[in-house]
Structure formats: C-alpha cells, structure tokens
Image (spheres, grey):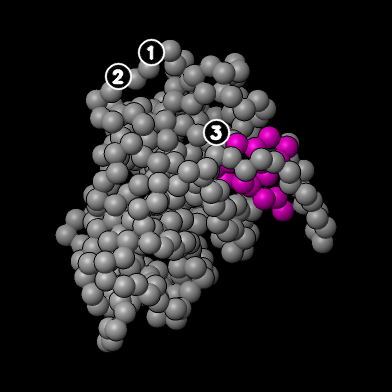
Amino acid sequence: TTVHWHGLFTPSEMDGAMEEGTPMVPAHGSRRYTFVPRPAGTRWYHTHVSAGRNLKRSTYTGQFGFLYVDPKSEPGGYDAEVFLALHGWDPYLGSMGADEGTLDVIYQSFSINSRSLGFGDPIRVQEGQKIMLRILNASATMVHRLALAGHKFEVTALDGNRVPTPREVEVLELGPAERIDAIVTMSQPGIWILGEVDDRVRNAGLGVVVEYANRQGVARWTAPSGAGWDYTVFGRQGDAPRADAELVPLVFRQKFAGNRWVDHWTINGKSFPKTDPVLVHANRRYRLRFDNQSDEAHPLHLHRHSFELTKFAGVATSGVVKDVVMVPARRQVEVDFTADNPGPSLLHCHLLE
C-alpha cells in the first residue's frame, strides 16, 4: 500500500502516490514518511493504491483518517469542535436508473465516524453553544449533502483553507475528498438528526444525532427547503483573474467501455498513463481550465499544491483556495496555482469508479 497525505505540501517521494515515485509500503513491512506538515487546516490521509475492479481496496475500505494541522493563530469563535468523516460500506456493482449499459457502485450502508445513524453516541450540546464541525467526505464515489433541521451552517473554510466570505447555508455539499469547516449555533433545543438529505442514504446510516442537554425523545429529521451549493458565494465575486497566469486547457471526455462495465475516460483525448504531462516552470502561476464535456461531475484533485478558484461555471471569483473542486457536468471551471513545490504532482479525478 501507500499513504497519501491529502492537502499537504509534501515532497513527491513522501506524497504517497506511486505515479510520483513514492515507494510502496511492502506487505507486512513498514516505511517512514518524513515531512513538515503544512499548510495548517483540515487535511486527511488515505491509501492511494489503485482499486481497479476490486471494491475491497483503496478508499472503498476504512484506510483513511483526519489529519488536522493547528494554525499558529486560531481565530476561534466557537466553544467546541467535532470531526465527522462520511463513508459508505459494503459496495457492489449494480445498475441504477434506466441506463443499464454501465454499472454503478452501490453501497449497502453508510456511516459517520464508522457508526451508522442510531448506533453511535450523539453529539451532545447545550443551547447557545457554537460548535465547529470539521467534515470530511471519505467516500470513494459519492457526493453527500448534509442538513441539520432548524439550524444553519456558517462555512468558514473549504478543504482546510479559510474562505474570504463566510456565509450561512442550510445544506452542505461535499464531493469525494472534500472537507468543510462550518460553525453551527445551537439555537433550537431538542433532539435532531444531522444527516444526508437523500432519504435512502440517510436511512441506510449516514447521519448522527445532535442531542441538547436535558432533552429527551426520538431524534427528528426535517427536510431542508433547498439544497443549492455554490463555491463562489464564499469568495470575492467579480474580481478580474490575474493576467499573469499561463493557461493550461484540459478537456475531460468519456467513452462507453463495453458491455456492463465502467466508462473509459480521457484528458485531452488520452487516458492515463498515456496522457501528456503538463510541464511547468518553478514559481510561475498557471491557470488550469477544466472543461468537463461528460455527463458526470468530477472531483478533481491536485497533489502537493492548493489552487484558487478563478471561474466557476462562468462566474468569476477569487479567494477560495482548495485542493479538490467538483466540476459539474458539461461545465468549465478555472483554477490558478503556483508551481512552487518541485517534482512530479498528480492531477486526477477522485472518483474510483
């Protein structure tokens, strides 16, 4: 196996990706990873072996965990913090919907912090408290949307990086590998479910009980009134992109792979490992244009760097710094990054299917 330190600025040989030259950890053996943990914020680690058709490997498993790097100065503004990792279990290949040409990964159960809804300890709170939730979507394939009846989430950071414009939202949306830091003011005494908006997924376990002090009864769920999600509301809208960034166009397409198996994916007409490497110069700024010409959204992740969103589905923005971005189907997203960490860096979709 290998261990990838997701969101950290590691040397290539310590990043945990074989494609970058990181040595494998041998079976029944060990390997020491040595690096300075930076930048600060909500990061995570996970196995980076290829799953292929084996749904018992890679991030289909429980081989992952949080890695939180304390900042030198923490703005605070909350009374307690809770780490929540979302995951699906017992996956199998099946057909969903009318299209029976390809197979999808379907999960039989879900969990938050390895406990399904109703089987773990509740999050115990008191009225008036401000609780910082640090949430990770550790799913191999699924986007998750979370809500907490009667409450709103004040989003303060995305992928561990503080946003320039914190905003309150009713629903949080996380693609695979994304993280959100959000503060919830506990203002509605009762016993509630913090869980997935999709009834099927929540009923299969993706939820946790939030229990106010001195309250008893059955945990309640109320569907949110809306489920919209937009990165740009947390940025500085309308800012003109920097003119010094060199454009790198990347076109994502899919081709039907054959009878009842996964699709075949390409970047600029080629599939890995035959894709052309993007050659960059040290300390220059580059603009990656992700042109998704497929019918599926893609969570695109750049190893060993962070990037700044400059345009999302036609809307100019700045200030939102991430290491994973969900590129909607049939849309374009542009991000800027500075090539300031020498060595090979993998850019890939974080979906395993």
Residue 146 image position (x, y, % from top left): 32, 60
Q: Which numbered marker is on residue 305?
A: 3
Left or right for 152, reference 144:
left
Residue placed under numbered mark 1 in the picture: 243
Who comes first in sequence, dot 2 or dot 3? 2
Q: Tell me if residue 168 can be seen.
A: yes
Q: Residue at x 60, y 18 (%)?
A: 282
Proximity of marks 1 and 2: CB atoms separated by less than 8 Å: yes
Numbered range of the magenta stretch: 1-17
Vertical side of 269 occupied by 50: above or below: below
Q: Residue at x 77, y 43 (%)?
A: 23
For the residues labelled 1 and 2, the Cα–Cα distance comes to: 8 Å
Vertical side of 239 occupied by 206: above or below: below
Residue 337 image position (x, y, % from top left): 48, 26
Tally of numbered discs: 3
Examine the structure image and report whether residue 171 is included in the region drawn in magenta. no
For the residues labelled 2 and 3, the Cα–Cα distance comes to: 22 Å
| Image quadrant where residue 200 sits | bottom left
- In the rendered structure, which amino acid carries the disc numbered 1? Ala
The extreme right residue here reads: 29
Label 1 neighbour load within 10 Å: few <14, some 14-19, many 20+: few
**Nearest the eye: 176 or 141:** 176
